[in-house]
Image: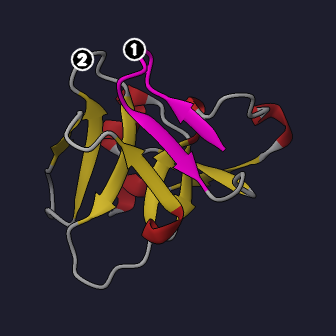
């Protein structure tokens, strides 16, 4: 699956469509409304490098990336060594029918 931010400067490619996506209620996700698909970092390509900036807050365990130009939330990556998961904003995927995918509510506000 491929996709990009609104302006097209950050491109995302993953090995397969997501089986489900997460709708989180943490303070950031409430404002940005991403639907996150989770992958092993080896299964995700974000290109070109350097077109997104990471926002680090709270417990400083993840960097939440957005396009430097259009501001779209693109993905998050772990800042913890050995963590084998990252999130990609499934709203960026071209042709993905979000109505056909399970949306799981994640209580991120509890963390």
At horizontal 39% and vertical 28% (from top left) the residue drawn is: 32
The location of residue 22, given as percent across then percent down, is 58, 51
Q: Which residue is mark 2?
A: 69
Q: Which residue is mark 1?
A: 7
Magenta range is 1-14
Q: Quadrant location of the C terminus?
A: bottom left
Instruction: Determine the image quadrant of residue 18.
Output: bottom right
The location of residue 26, given as percent across then percent down, is 37, 46
Residue 71 in magenta?
no
At horizontal 54% and vertical 60% (from top left) the residue drawn is: 38
Q: Nearer the viewer, residue 45 or 57?
A: 45
Q: Secondary structure at mark 1?
A: loop
Please indicate whether residue 81 sits to the left or right of residue 85 in the image.
left
Q: Residue at the right extreme?
A: 100
Q: Secondary structure at mark 2?
A: loop
Give me the disc on residue 74. none
Q: Quadrant location of the N terminus?
A: top right
The answer to whether residue 23 is visible is no
Residue 2 higher or lower than 80, as above or below: above
Please indicate whether residue 97 sits to the left or right of residue 30 in the image.
right
């Amino acid at each position: 699956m491929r996709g990009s931010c609104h302006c097209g400067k950050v491109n995302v490619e993953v090995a397969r469509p997501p089986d489900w996506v997460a709708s989180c209620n943490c303070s950031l996700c409430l404002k940005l409304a991403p639907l996150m698909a989770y992958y092993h970092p080896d299964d995700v390509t974000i290109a070109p490098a350097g077109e997104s900036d990471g926002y680090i807050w709270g417990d400083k365990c993840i960097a939440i990336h957005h396009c430097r130009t259009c501001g779209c939330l693109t993905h998050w990556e772990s800042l913890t060594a050995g963590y084998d998961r990252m999130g990609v904003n499934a709203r960026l995927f071209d042709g993905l029918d979000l109505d056909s995918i399970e949306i799981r509510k994640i209580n991120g506000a509890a963390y």
